[in-house]
Amino acid sequence: MTDTSPHLRQEVSIDQQVALRTAATRLAEEFTGVYGAETIERFLYSSHDQFATDSTIPHYLPLLAERFARQRLQALARVEGHHRDGRPVVLFLCTHNAGRSQMALGFFTHLAGDRAVAWSGGSEPGAAVAPAAVAAMAERGIDISQEFPKPWTDEVVRAADVVVTMGCGDACPVFPGTRYENWDLDDPAGLDLADVRPIRDEVERRVRRLLDQIGILVPRPGSPVATAM
């Protein structure tokens, strides 16, 4: 469930407090007229707590919190009708949000551009995106090295027109009125690059099919236009 506690549950340094205040100011400017400071701080601080674990590098915590809070606020604005641009929204979910769903997000964003919105999440987010998945996508000219595993939240799921699940089973959220697809794909966790490549290629095939189904036309693989993208 979405956590919107208004207070930080973790001890933070002075530098992190300053960074979070700066992030709150940026978000307030972006969502002027949509959400007030109190709502923004609730989402920012609860997002910070989602990532405040022993394995997280403290220096990056405010940045991760800001990026995640921005996504959640964008989703909430769609759910509440504050933002309607007609673009379809797709959410990719797996267990750790470290391999399959991140590769799907990478392909979808690369191919759809600004014609659609895509997010990803996990039922049990890992510490980092799998290096083999990053390397496999780099071979396709797609950089997912700056992505990070994150949990799904109610507002993100409710904002999606299509939710694609990959191995999270009963842990994946289900809301009425949302289209769901389940992609039966091997988990790339612990695999080397050679073993991840077939999974990557199958993810690309399914993403292309999904884009076609939702009316987003993309070049065929190997075409001059596709190579230039």
Image (spheres, grey):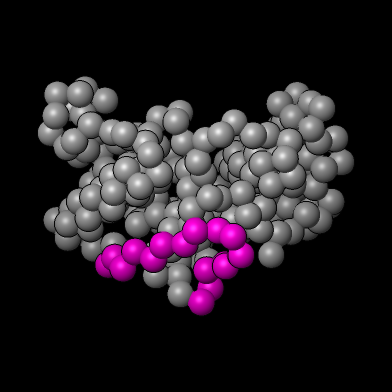
Does residue 116 show up? yes
Q: Quadrant of the N terminus?
A: bottom right
103 versus 225 height, above or below: below
Residue at the spot x=44%, y=31% of the render?
115
Question: From what the image shows, is residue 94 above or below residue 109?
Answer: below
Residue 69 appears in the picture as rendered: no
Which x, y percent locates residue 98?
41, 56
The spot of residue 82 in percent (x, y) is: 73, 36
- Magenta stretch, main secondary structure class: loop
Q: Position of residue 221 (x, y in %)?
A: 17, 37
Please give left or right for residue 101 compared with residue 132 in the image: right
Residue at 28%, 53% (x, y): give it.
206
Instruction: Give the camera-side residue of 134 and 79.
Output: 79
> Left or right: 222 with respect to 25?
left
Q: Any magenta on residue 138?
A: no
- Tell me if residue 114 comes above or below residue 161 in the rendering: above
- Report the number of discs: 0
Q: What residue is at 48 percent from the left and 53 percent from the top?
A: 162
Q: From what the image shows, is residue 153 above or below residue 24?
A: below
Q: Which residues are magenta?
A: 170-187
The quadrant of the image that shows the C terminus is: top left
Q: Quadrant of residue 26?
A: top right
Front residue of 70/115: it is 115
- Quarter of the image for residue 188 reads bottom left
Relative to 228, 115 lies left or right: right
Query: In the image, residue 171 lies at what x, y percent?
Result: 53, 73
User: As rendered, which of 84 and 10 lies closer to the eye?
Assistant: 84
Left-right relation of 16 to 119: right
Q: Residue 181 colored magenta?
A: yes
* Quadrant of the image occupied by residue 76: top right
